[in-house]
Each structure stands twice: as structure tokens, then as C-alpha cells.
Amino acid sequence: LLDVRFVNHSPYMSSSRKVGCRKVNSDGDDLAVNNKAVADPPAVTEGPLTVVLFENNGQCHHYRALHTAVLVPESNESGMKVLVNAILRIRKNSSRTVKQIDTMDSEDESNHRKESEWKGWSDYMSSKKEKLAKQFEESDFQSEPKKNIFAGISVYVNGYTDPPADQLKRLILEYGGKYDLYQSMKITHVIASVLPHVKIKKLVGSEKIMKPDWILDSIAAGRLLPENDYRLYFGGSNLDGKIKSNLIMKPGAEDLDARQRQAKRRHVDCTDYSNYFETFYKHSRLHFISTTAQKMKSFVQQLQTCQVDTFDENRQELINSILKMEPCCSSTPTDMQEQQSYIMHLDMDCFFVSASLQNYPLLRGKPVAVAHSNHSDQAVELDSWAEIASCNYEARMCGVRNGMRLGSALELCPNLKTISYDFERYAEISQTIYSLIAKYTRDLEAVSCDEMFVDLKELCLNTGVRPLQFASFIREEIFETTGCTASVGIGTNKLVARLATKVAKPNGQFQVLKADVSQFMKATKVADLPGVGVHIWQKLSERNIFTCEDLLQVDLGQLQRDFGKKTATALYQKALGRDDSCLKAEIDRKSISCNVNYGIRFNTLKDAHGFLEKQSEELAKRMVDNQVEAKHITLKLMIRAPEASVETKKYMGHGICNTVSHSVALANYTSDANSIAKEVLNLFKQFNATVSDIRGIALSVKKLKNLQQTKEENSNSLMKAFLKQPTKQCDKDIMPVKEQPVECIKQASSSSSSVISKPNNVFEVIDKENYEKCKTLIYSWALQNEIPNSADISYVKSYLLKLVDALYLEKVESLLKLLRQATRERKSLKDVFNSIHEQVQDAVVRRFGFLLDI
């Protein structure tokens, strides 16, 4: 008896699945099978129906029918007759097929394993593949390769191609490659012209789907050409590891080629250490934003420490300009004192776009966005994963938002124009804006390259200018100078001022007076409060809390139970419009970092180590620039998640990753690149990560010590140490005395306790001014790194010798101890101290016969 199974090799079905006793193939014919479950056959894309006969012990042979279907009635004798008749027709029509059917044929028996050895479908298919491979070895294709262009490459052709599969097979074999009829783990490359959506969804991301031109062009070039130029698809995954439908290529393979070439122009090889970081950060928007913010904070700090000589002139110009605009409007200091403070929040409108449009005047009034992708072919941009950094209000009216993927933005706004970054222009305008504000007041706090807080109370009190008048004046001056518009919010504190700016945008100004704060805050959405992210917003919306008024109606205790005491209290205070934070003048950095999460692709461990060493140098450079040393280092790696594809949707992006980190506390503070690199490499060894899966590296240091501040503290400590030096007070100030003989000199062999009873005046004047001058010189030597000049050394030495001659040994002893203390702080003073000390002691011995105890 024979059981019947079937496999449909139709182009419309990649595989056949046994689901019961009846099965319908692509032609609609009914196929009857028994109910015994078997493994699903492998996916095959072409060919007619294949009938597989299983004997009652599970053994099988396979037949290739010349017709598209075989009708087999269920479990009856007539059904078997139909099957036998079909097989007889196959024997009659094809001698080669007859060989496959006739298992007793001695000529073909050697090509089959014994039926008792087959253990199921997968074992049968393995045998089939072995047989086909042997046939290829015996075929005419397996002649001596003309050239080993495709050595080590195993190819599987999927679907229709141009040229057809037979021609590709011949070419691949002729030039040293391998060709397989079935897709398996041994396949290195899949050749296809186009794949249907159902097959794309089955990609796991690691397959190399190549165009047929890769084979033809490589043969024409006489060498294997780069793969990326001929890739048909770059796989990618979403959060659940599945390929999304937007991976399907737009009609026309040239579009993807152009997009890949565009991305490759921006990509820098991370194994080229010579200028990687310089090039990477030169094109990094986030790097520019963070570094420019720090530069502006330093710029403000420098401004605040400088003497202002032109404030009066600038402020008078301000008053005159405002009086011209509003001749009847002038406020008095009394009016200003009614409100405790005026905090102005200034924020530039669509800063990157408005600054870049200076070079594209024809685009004004049109929807424009700034992004890395600015390809002229919109079909390419539709698939772009470039992120929009900034878009103007014309684009926002179409639904485009900052941070949106460019392809999605173009679907919302097809006429959206993209322009490139112009970081130099942004930095120039940013410094100009800060300089304009600093002409009138130095009460600034830099937030970013295009945002700041200004305390206007002192300015308004001393000039009589109202806050809104100054806001209008400065916005106009900014526009005339830079061509960019700004929005201003004014409130009683930083929180209210920031929220007022939201009302003022775009290109406007708005003030919230002290009496109006409560009403203003009630109408404010909780989503607009600083610190309210997606997670908190979702929890609030679940409780029907959408405005600050809704929030204030909830009991504080209930909020604390829902959100925690700290978060709930902060939310409640913000809803009331309360903010006690002051403008920050000083820069207090808690950490410094150097992060790279784009373009990281390592092939060897050596590549990874070299990159980490260069990254350590970059981190050390930043520490030196900020005059800090650190005592704690953290290394963080982004490692490709197991379910994520090797190739990401965004070219050379990091994709879905698992983040891991290790830290080390150092014994001493350091900013040395070699020391940092050594610790970083030790941390890297602890991960034991596969280098090819690393997608991002972040180095950071904390527990910082400010070198400038430390220097000042050391100076103060040194001053205190000098002041604490035990010195004997003289009964009288150092003044000229009458010449008189020495009455008594108590000598001790080598003790400084010998007392000179009465000084002997050998020169006319020894006053406090010279004594203090000598002390100041010695003190300054301790603070400077350079060796003192010879004139100062001679002055101190000469003055000490005069004190010895005048019998003021206590003063001599005090100054020498001070100099010795300075030597401990600065080793470079050792030779100076030894020279002065030796000559002074010689003078004491000659005069008194003993040494001073220093």
C-alpha cells in the first residue's frame, strides 16, 4: 500500500502545507491525501506538481510529473488505479522520468540510498540535494574555471532574473563559484531582480540579496566588485524583529543605488583613525548643539568677569531708540518695584532653517527643512531615514515636525524642500545674538546656541525701559543684524517666562504679570510643563488631567501616592507657577563624554582597540579644554540585539541594540590620554563582546576636579599656611635705632634660640614696606611655575643680609622659613632657596658664630 503526499512547485506557492485530507493546488484541482502529519517541504519557486509516494513503512521516492495536477480519490482502489495510470503516462512520455520511477532499475539503483535509510522528509531532501550536487559535478559546467572570481561564493537564484538562471549558473561555475538549486545555510549570496512582498517579509536581515548585474559586471571587470553597489535590499527590523513593509524598493533599482551612494558619501570608515572623530563631529548635529551650548556658557561667563565701560552709552542709545518709537511711554523705577523680578526667555524661531535660508532666499515662504539628506531626486528621499533637525512654520502647517523621518515628512508635505546644515553660520549668528544682549546687561544664562534667559530687573530699574519695550527693541535688532526672528516670553521666574514664549511663538512676545500668573497657569497644558515626558503624560491623561487646573484639583497626597513624593511635589509647584531657580552664571560640569553611535562597524578586535584609543584621546582633549581632571571612567557599548538585522534601515545606523556598561574608579585624578585608554581597554575586555555586533561606543568621566579652581584653592591653602607660621612679635616696629654696642650675645653652638639682646643699626632704614615687599615676592614665587628672575632673587638675598647686619635675626628666620615652605610647593625653587640660605647662614656664622635653625 502507498500513502500519498504532494509538493506543489508552482510559481504562485513557495511551499505546500498538509492541512487535512484534501488540498487544493494553484490550478484549483482537488488533491486527496491521508491524515498522517509530515514535515513541510522546503520552499521551491518554480516547476509543476511533484508527487511523492510513501510506502507503508514511511519510505519514499519522488516523481516529476509532466502535467500540473494528479487527482487521487480518497483511500480506495480506483484512486490507486488513477495514480498508476498517471505514472504509466509519465514513463511513456519521459525516459528520464521513468528512471526515477523504476526503483528496481539496476542502472539507477546506485544513485539512491536504500529506502530503509530514509528517516523522513528532511532526510529525503538531503539525499536529493546530494544527488543534484553530484549531477552538477558530472555536468558540462564543471570544467576548469576560467578565473576564480567567485571563489568561496555559493549562489542561489531566486525567481525570474535577466539573464535567466541557467545562464547565471553557467557563468558562476565557469568563474570559480558554486551554484545551488535550494536555499540553505551554505548560500552566501542570493541573486534576484525583484522579490515579492511575501518573500521580503521572510528576510531576517543577514541575507545578501544581489542584482544579476553584480555577476556580469564582476566578470567584465575581471575581479569581484564591491557588494554594496549591487545590493537589492538592505534588511532592517522593527521592535519585534520583523521586516517592515517599507523595506520594499520603489520601482526602479537606481533609486536605492542613489540613496546608498548618497549615504556613503557622508559615511566615514571608523577604522580610519587618522581623522575619524574630526570628520564625524564636523557633521554631527548633536555634537554641535552640545559644544556650542558650552561655548556660549563660557562666553557669558567671560563677559560677566570683564569690566564694562560702554554700558552707559549703550543704554542711553537704548532709551533714545525706545523714546523715538514711543515718545509718551516712560516708566519710573517705582513702577518697576511693584514686581519682584522680570525674567526674559528668548528663543530663536526655527533657528537652523532661518539661519540657513540666508543662502537660499528663493525658498522663503516655502516649506523647508534642514536635514542631512538633500537629494534632488524625491523618489530617493521618500525612502530616506534622515532625521529632520529643524523645519519652518510653513512645513509645520502640513504636519511636519522636528525629529521626524524625512521620508515620512515628504509623505505629509510632498513639496518640502531640504537644505544642508551650515554649522559655521549657526555658531556665528549665535555669538552675535549673545553679544547684542550683553551690550545692555550681563545678567544672562546661556541655555543653548539659540536660547537664553535674561534678568531684566536691573536694566529696567536703571533705564526706566519696560520689559516689553526692551523685548521689542532687541528682537528688531537681532532681525536687522542676523536676518533671523526671535520670540520672547517674560514672567516672574524662568518657568513662567519659558511658558510665555510658547504663547509668543512664532516671531512674537508675551508677558505674564505677577497678578496674572495664577490664571495663566490654570490654562497651561500639563504636557507643556518642563520635565513632563511621555510616561508622566500618559499617567496624567489616564486620570483625566490635561491642564494645570485639572492637576491642582487633585489632592497632593493622592499625587504623591501615584507619582512619588518628589515628582508629585515638583508637578504641583510647577502647576502653581512657582520656580525658585536663579540664573546660573557659573559652569558646573558634572561629567564629560565622547559618544559615537553611527557608522560603527568593526571587523577585527584590533579595529575596536584602535578606535577606543583614539576615542580616549578625544575625551582627554575635551577634559584639557575644560581644565578638568576626572577620577571615574565609564565605558558603554551598544550591541546589536539578537533579533535585530545586521543591516539597519538607516544606513550605518545602530538599529535595535542592547546597552551594557562598565565603570572604574581611579586612584588619582587624571586627564592623560594614555592613562584613560589603558583603563578603557581593560573595561572593554570585561564585555567579551563580538566586535562585529558593536554599534555604538560611549566614553564618559565624572567626579571632576576643576584645575583652575584647585589652583586657587591651593593658593589659598598656601596663604593660610604662611599666615599660620609661628613668628615672634617684635616689641617695637622696625625703625631706625641709635648705634650702640652689643651688650650681650648668648651663644649656643648651633641653636637659633640665641638671643640678640639689642639690634645694632648698620644702615639707616629698615621699614615695614620693604619687609612686606620681600614677603610678597616669596609668596608670588610659590604661585608661579617659572623660576624667579635674577633681579628679584638679588633683592631678597640683599635684604636678608641687611637684616643680619642689623641684628634682626627673628625676621631673617621668618623669611627663610617662608621661602622653604614655598620650595615645598614648587620644587623649581629649590636651587633659589639653597643659594639664598647658604649665603645668609654664612653671614650669620661670620657675625655670631652659630647657624639659624630653619
Image (cartoon, rainbow, N blue to C red):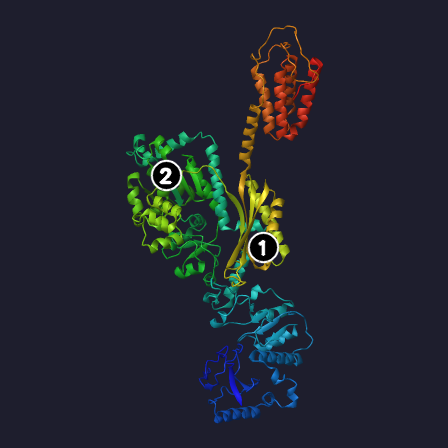
Residue 792 pos. (x, y %): 63, 22
Residue drawn where x is 40% and y is 59% of the image: 415
Q: Is residue 161 left or right of residue 366?
A: right
- Look at mark 1 in the image and give the residue it sits on: 687
Residue 22 pos. (x, y %): 45, 84
Residue 25 pos. (x, y %): 46, 83
Mark 2 crowdedness (10 Å alpha carbons): few <14, some 14-19, many ≥20: many
Circles 1 and 2 in contact, beta carbons < 8 Å: no
Residue drawn where x is 63% and y is 90% of the image: 105
Q: CA distance from mark 1 to mark 2?
A: 49 Å
State the SS at label 2: strand
Quadrant of the image occupied by residue 602: bottom right
| Of residues 22 and 752, the one drawn nearer to the viewer in this rendering | 752
- Look at mark 2 in the image and give the residue it sits on: 343
Quadrant of the image occupied by residue 722: top right
Residue 233 visible at all: yes
Task: Name the kind of residue labelled 2 in the image.
Answer: Ile
Residue drawn where x is 54% and y is 72% of the image: 192
Q: Is residue 759 above or below residue 91?
A: above
Circle nearer the N terminus (1, 2): 2
Q: Is residue 145 above or below residue 577?
A: below
Task: Name the kind of residue labelled 1 in the image.
Answer: Phe
User: Quadrant of the image for the C terminus?
Assistant: top right
Q: Is residue 150 left or right of residue 200?
A: right
